[in-house]
Image (cartoon, rainbow, N blue to C red):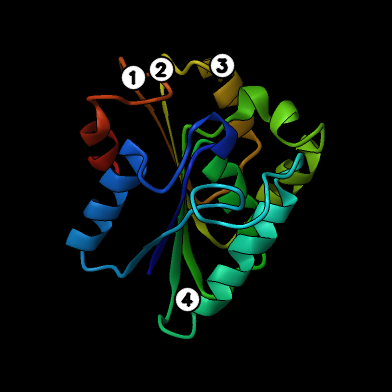
């Protein structure tokens, strides 16, 4: 099963985002059961966005537990803020095969986590037995390539890192460029 997490809700991110939809279609075509969802406070979801992403992480951990009642393993896929949430849930998600982080917001993590960035860095460093795929556009609006590479240098193997040419954070009209790396 693939569980796909969307960008920051207060800035318009939801499960119908262009990247989330492209990823869902791709994974479904590859034979995965796919779950995409709205995080707290988005669409019809209850609650509101937290200041640290930790409540969204707890929600995704519960989703992982539910999905494992129906699937043997999980691939977590997160885009932007959803990448941060997916990373946060990864350490407590049993039977995790792979984590895919697209446009990880390394350059603005401090503001999305209320200065709890180190918590997420520590989580990433503990994922030593999980395959990690890290993708960003070279023109990302929030994270420079140098900041992304500094962040990925801290990511333990196994990992694959791709910097995609001529793409920004939003990937409008360039969604297929991501899919070629999955």
Residue 126 seen in the current view: no
Residue 1 at x, y = what percent? Answer: 37, 70
Tag 2 near tag 1, CB within 8 Å: yes
Relative to 51, say whether 169 is above or below. above
Q: Residue furthest bottom?
A: 69
Q: Residues within 10 Å of mark 1 (few under 14, many from 20)?
A: many
Which residue is tagged 2? 138
- The percent position of residue 166, horizontal first and vertical second, equals 30, 14
Q: Which residue is mark 3?
A: 146
Mark toward the viewer: 3 or 1: 1
Q: Judge the density around disc 2: few (<14), some (14-19), many (≥20) Cα neighbours within 10 Å.
A: many
Could you give the CA–CA distance between mark 2 and mark 1, rounded to whole angstroms?
Answer: 6 Å
3D distance between C-alphas at marks 3 and 4: 36 Å
Rendered location of residue 2, percent (x, y) = 38, 63
| Mark closest to the chain's N terminus, 3 or 1 | 3
From what the image shows, is residue 56 above or below residue 67? above
Crowding near the residue tagged with mark 3, few <14, some 14–19, many ≥20 C-alpha atoms within 10 Å: few
Q: Nearer the viewer, mark 4 or mark 1?
A: 4
* Frontmost residue, 40 versus 88: 40
In the rendering, which numbered label is found on residue 105? none
Q: Is residue 87 left or right of residue 132?
A: right
- Compared to 78, does 175 lie above or below? above
Distance from Cα at disc 2 to Cα at disc 4: 34 Å
Front residue of 158/114: it is 114
Choose the circle earlier in sequence order: 2 or 4: 4
Give 125 or 169, whichever is nearer the viewer.
Answer: 169
Residue 167 falls in image quadrant:
top left
**Residue under numbered circle 1:** 167
Residue at left offset 23%, top offset 62%: 28
Q: Which residue is mark 4?
A: 67
From the viewer's perspective, tell me whether residue 90 is left or right of residue 101: right
């Amino acid at each position: 099963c693939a569980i796909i997490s969307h960008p920051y809700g207060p800035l318009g991110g939801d499960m119908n985002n262009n990247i989330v939809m492209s990823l869902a279609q791709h994974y479904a075509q590859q034979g995965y059961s796919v779950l995409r969802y709205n995080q707290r406070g988005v669409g019809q979801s209850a609650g509101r966005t937290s200041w640290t992403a930790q409540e969204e992480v707890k929600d995704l951990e519960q989703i992982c537990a539910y999905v494992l009642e129906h699937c043997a393993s999980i691939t977590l896929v997160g885009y932007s803020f959803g990448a941060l949430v997916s990373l946060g849930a990864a350490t407590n998600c049993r039977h995790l095969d792979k984590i895919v982080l697209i446009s990880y917001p390394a350059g603005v993590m401090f503001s999305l986590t209320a200065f709890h960035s180190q918590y997420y860095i520590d989580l990433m460093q503990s994922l030593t037995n999980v395959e990690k795929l890290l993708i960003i556009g070279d023109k990302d609006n929030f994270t420079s390539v140098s900041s992304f590479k500094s962040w990925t240098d801290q990511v333990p193997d196994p990992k694959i890192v791709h910097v995609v040419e001529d793409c920004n954070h939003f990937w409008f009209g360039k969604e297929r460029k991501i899919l070629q790396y999955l």
